[in-house]
Amino acid sequence: MKSKKILSVIIPVYNEESTVEEILDKVLSRPETGEIIIVDDASSDKSVEVIKKYIDSKKKKNIKLFSQKQNRGKGAAIRRGFDEASCPIVIIQDADWEYTPDDYPVVLEPIISGKADVCYGSRFQPGPGQVHNFRHMMGNKFLTNVSNFLTNLALTDMETCYKAFKREVIQNLNLETNRFGIEVEMTAKIAKAKCLDIYEVPIRYFSRSYEEGKKIGWKDGVAAFWYMVKYNLLKSSQNFYKKPWKDVMR
């Protein structure tokens, strides 16, 4: 698999008028980017206006904008993006600067080289980087450990934004979560597939504060527990997938 123009970048947007244009510039400049799929989740600021102006100025056919009529949550926006993806590999990109597209080569390498079907970019694997907010870090690690206990995976960062997938893998998952619980749901369904090779690689992370626009809160952490129980213990995996994996992973 060649490394150029192989990537569908899914960008969920909600009130990111101050950062979305810069992140689009950076994503568009990456040689791996084949298409950018933006899903605006009914922003109440000028995000859509900024994005439309940006698309018109670039005259690029590989930037697509979809708008939700009502605010449904990050998970709903991501799911819409997955449905629209057409490149061999799909990655999620937040519309702020917490994650840098310069790390795409690191996250994509295990998939490009044929070693992985899914790759998580970990903010907590050893390496240089910004000092984390202690409470946020411990909350993320706690949720990751609970998820690991239920899935029997040994991830260090289940809640990371940077998750990359072979397109046929992510499009075979029956996803239904609308908010931040999408991270838990994806992880549980990937783990239950059993046949998928999962990698994790270190990435950089540049945390922003709530004053700067961070949206996830403690209520989402509590909800994550429910989703872990729901998708790991209560729901049968029979309906987790659209096709049998033997038909997908030929």
Image (cartoon, rainbow, N blue to C red):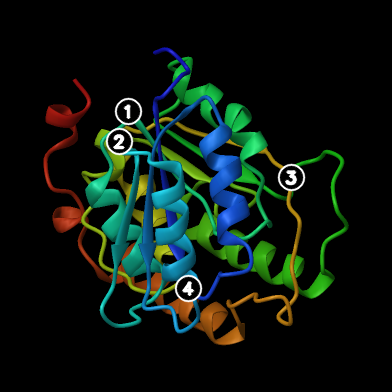
Q: Position of residue 11 (x, y in %)?
A: 45, 55
Q: CA distance from mark 2 to mark 3?
A: 24 Å
Viewed as shown, does residue 119 lie left or right of 156?
left
Question: Which residue was labeled with disc 3?
Answer: 204
- Res 144 quadrant in image: bottom right
Question: Which residue was labeled with disc 1?
Answer: 88
Can see residue 115? no
Q: CA distance from mark 1 to mark 4?
A: 26 Å
Which secondary structure, mark 1? loop
Can see residue 246? yes
Q: Foreground mark, 4 or 2?
A: 4
Q: CA distance from mark 4 to mark 2?
A: 24 Å
Q: CA distance from mark 4 to mark 3?
A: 23 Å
Which secondary structure, mark 2? helix
Give residue 119's mark.
none
- Res 44 quadrant in image: bottom left
Given residues 242 and 17, the one toward you in this image is 17
Asked if the residue under mark 2 is in contact with the one under mark 1, i.e. CB atoms within 8 Å, the reply is yes
Which secondary structure, mark 3? loop
Q: Amino acid at mark 2?
A: Arg
Q: Position of residue 66 (x, y in %)?
A: 29, 61
Give the mark, 1 or 2, whose residue is nearer the N terminus: 1
Give residue 167's mark.
2
Give the mark, 2 or 3, whose residue is nearer the N terminus: 2
Quadrant where the C terminus is found in the figure = top left
Question: Which residue was labeled with disc 4?
Answer: 14
Asked if the residue under mark 3 is in contact with the one under mark 1, i.e. CB atoms within 8 Å, the reply is no
